Amino acid sequence: MTTHDDELIALLLGDRRRSPALGRWLGTLEGRRELRAYRRTLEALRQLYGDAGAAPRRTVYYCAISTPIGRVFVAASEAGLVRVSFRQSEASFVAELRQRLAADVIRSPARTADIVHQLRAYFAGERRSFDVRLDLRHTTSFQRRVLMAAARVPAGQAPQALVYVSGAVPQGDGAANLSPRGNTDPINIALQPVSGQGKGFVVARNLGLIDALEVSLFNLKPDTVYSVYVSGQKNPVASFRTNAKGMANGTAIGPMREVANALSSKEVTPSKVVVIEGDGAASADKAVLVSGN
């Protein structure tokens, strides 16, 4: 995103007038390109948002899928995806859809098949972006502002809250009372099988005072313990037991900056991630997955 994004969003939403600095920037090639992109995004949101108050009662279809993070519910209308939720019971998910959308809710794996297919590919490490239509007619005006800004954020950003408040900093460059974020960009590592059909990926994140190593494993032996090692480390970073479908997912959190730094592709000789079967000492003959470095 550019330094002019907040002001440009406010201008398009009618919250503030064009400043001389913004006017000069909009006269550049970059400014014209960004303005066209934001107008396209706003028009798409307007078409999807529609007039919720006058809209007839809708039908929303939903289903549940098993994933490494537990059971995930997805819901979609004829217009597109309306909700993804986890750590929630089916009864509360359905009740929320009925209350928030004033819709008839029907369980239908067939109506949500495309969304489910893309989610499964994502959890298997085969997809990083999605190609599904969204139905945003139930969103509020404030949520539309957030979505408009979030649509311009590149993929791969660490989870974060994004809030746009019009006119919060009326003067200056908009950076008053702000400080740099503490976490650095995540390091993404794909895991390839030594043999068999296993697969997985690791995401290393520096969270400031502590670090996190997120591990997702797929297509391994069911109900089996696997240990994750980083070359150069004597002890495993984490150990997981797969479920009945051979999947496991977990996060190790602590002062692991040495591990995270060792995984950086910027190093001359980056370390490897090795997943072995069992919880014993690292052994090459027990390796089932390795990083591609």
Image (cartoon, rainbow, N blue to C red):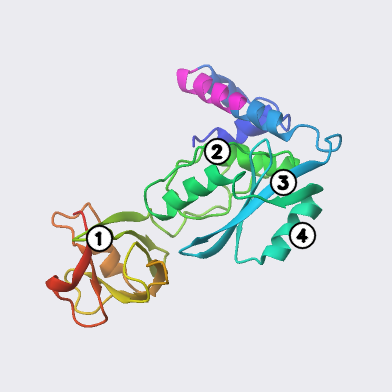
Residue 113 visible at all: yes
Q: Residue at x 19, y 69 (%)?
A: 287
Percent across and percent down for residue 55 are 83, 35
Q: Crowding at label 3, few (<14), some or many (≥20) Cα neighbours within 10 Å?
A: many
Q: Which residue is mark 1?
A: 263
Q: Nearer the viewer, residue 97 or 257?
A: 97
Percent across and percent down for residue 279 are 27, 81
Percent across and percent down for residue 46 are 70, 30
Q: Which residue is mark 4?
A: 95
The answer to which of marks 2 and 1 sits earlier in the sequence is 2
Q: Amino acid at mark 1?
A: Leu
Instruction: Tell me the distance, in whole angstroms, between the alpha carbons under discs 1 and 4.
Output: 44 Å
Q: Start and end of the magenta stretch? A: 28-40
Location of the C terminus by quadrant is: bottom left
Farthest residue, direction bottom: 280
Q: Crowding at label 2, few (<14), some or many (≥20) Cα neighbours within 10 Å?
A: few
Query: Considering the numbered disc 2 on the image, is that residue within a helix, a strand or a loop?
Result: loop
Q: Is residue 112 left or right of residue 206?
A: right
Mark number for residue 132? 2
